[in-house]
Amino acid sequence: MQINGKAVEACGGEFFDVKNPATGELIDRVPMGSENDVDMAVGAAAAASGGWAATSPQQRGVILYRAAGIVRQKKDELAVLLTREQGKPLFEAKNEIEGFANVLEYYCGLAGSLRGDFVTVPQNGYAFTAKKPLGVCAAIIPWNMPALIMAWKIGPALISGNTVVLKPASNTPLTNLALASVLNEAGLPAGVLNVVTGPGNSVGEALVRSREVKKISFTGESGTGKRVAELAAGGMKRVTLELGGSDPMLVCDDAEIESAAIGALRGRFYNCGQTCTAVKRVYVFESVAEEFIKKLEAGIRNLRVGNGLDGNISVGPLNNLSQWEYVKGLVTEIKEKDEGKVLTGGKVPEGCEYEKGYFFEPSLVVDVPRDSRLLNEEVFGPVLPVVTVKDLDEAIEEANNTRYGLGASLWTKNLDRIRTGCEKLNAGVVWINQHLKVAPEVPFGGVKESGMGRENGPDALLEYMDTKTIMLKV
Ligand code: NAD
């Protein structure tokens, strides 16, 4: 844990293990935080709040920019740490660490844009608006992209003058702790960023309940998000909820089939399928289905599964035992009930021992019935179902037939179809001829049970500030 800029042990003196999902090796032991630790961290954040809010956005930007520079210098060691605790291939971990620095730098660039408005008001004279930080914000992080998602939260929160208590996922706290140390090294005043490690249902809930916490920025499953929203409502707190997704990919008959197959391959198997905006369902026009599936299958067979630290690996292990059990159980059920044809993969690789590497072969499933769990649950793993459709109307209807609405991609060269897709696909992000791309400059978030609020872009700053109106009669 880190409180007031220093590494501290938990009040209860207990620890929990962080293990490598590729090998089962113990990487480190981390303090098991409790409600008392949350109180201490929130107290530190509250004490630092006034001083930090009084600095200029430009001064804050200088510190964050320095931190981004240190992160770039330490990129290789941070990436190794991320791969060891999360499992992703090293090249993905390096991308993620770079993404952390990019996001921080982007918000440094926006420091000068934090300002209110001057408004003339009929009869009465003038009004001003001022943008005020909220105070102490909680940032609750999942294990799939712990570094990038940390930046999405602390970047806009800190630049706009808030202090933060961050709670990492228990499987991946080490990179978050290392990144928090970098911010301290860069000169962030004590108490501005604090980290409490420990279980979601105790530490996480205590943080959401804490009276001093004014806003909760949560990323995780939709079910957990609902619980967080419920608790936050009790204190009338602001929330940003970035939740689950079941992103569809729609491939039309005029699409570049080779690019679409590559898009599906990267979109599904990046991070071993554990990305909120992964391609989780493909709807392809019947007339090009055979060609698309053939190319995709060939691509999947070329993927190399293994320990992310080994060179040449394209897919690492699943991050944890429960995800591994879930994916294995789901694919076994599909085979037993004959609910689809597994064209490739569909099993644990040879020689993979229980609890010593949560590997699963990248899998392609076709002839999947519409009521299959594969199409209706958020499958967080390397399994891709492909369904054929007769036209765009059917594809859009199927794509929207879900409780989620995070992302969706449409693959076509036809402008009419692009316009229809942009208008009718019910998702927070619609990609055309690509999938998965996110950028600090562009707002990101979901509709329906994929959440509320936006991260990234200038919109995210508004999630961390109140508007105060001052009316003058002159
Ligand atoms: P999770 O909901 O289990 O946990 C997320 C975080 O919440 C963890 O830090 C956990 O300890 C904490 N937590 C758990 N219970 C809590 C509670 N009752 N109160 C407060 N905090 C609690 O999610 P996960 O398994 O870590 O992550 C995978 C999920 O995250 C997937 O559904 C994925 O789609 C989603 N996700 C969404 C986005 C997005 O931007 N929309 C990005 C990444 C991941």
Image: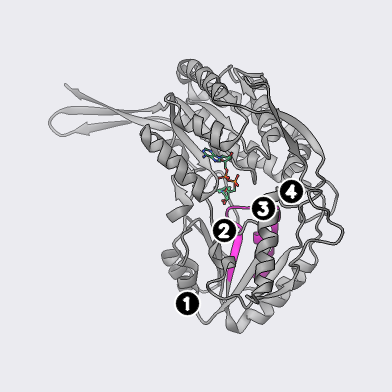
Res 214 label? none
Callout in the foreground (2, 4): 2
Q: Is residue 158 left or right of residue 348?
A: left
The disc, 2 or 4, on the residue closer to the chain's N-terminal end is: 4
Quadrant for ligand 1 reads: top right
Q: How far separated are the C-alphas under marks 2 and 4? A: 20 Å
How far across and how far down the image is residue 247, in percent?
55, 61
Q: Which residue is mark 2?
A: 378
Res 394 label? 1
Callout 4 environment at 10 Å: few (<14), some (14 to 19), or many (20+)?
A: many
Callout 2 environment at 10 Å: few (<14), some (14 to 19), or many (20+)?
A: many
How far across and how far down the image is residue 232, in percent?
41, 36
Callout 1 environment at 10 Å: few (<14), some (14 to 19), or many (20+)?
A: few
Q: Amino acid at mark 2?
A: Glu
The disc, 1 or 2, on the residue closer to the chain's N-terminal end is: 2
Range drawn in magenta: 260-282
Q: The N terminus lies in which quarter of the figure?
A: top right
279 within the magenta span: yes
Q: Is residue 83 above or below residue 421?
A: above
Q: How far separated are the C-alphas under marks 3 and 4? A: 14 Å
Q: How far separated are the C-alphas under marks 1 and 4? A: 35 Å
The disc, 1 or 4, on the residue closer to the chain's N-terminal end is: 4
Q: Is residue 416 left or right of residue 63?
A: left
Residue 240 can be seen in this image: no
Q: Nearer the viewer, residue 329 or 99?
A: 329
Callout in the foreground (3, 1): 3
Q: Amino acid at mark 4?
A: Lys
Q: Which residue is mark 4?
A: 88
Q: Which residue is mark 3?
A: 323
Q: Decide if ligand 1 comes within 8 Å of the CB at mark 3.
A: yes
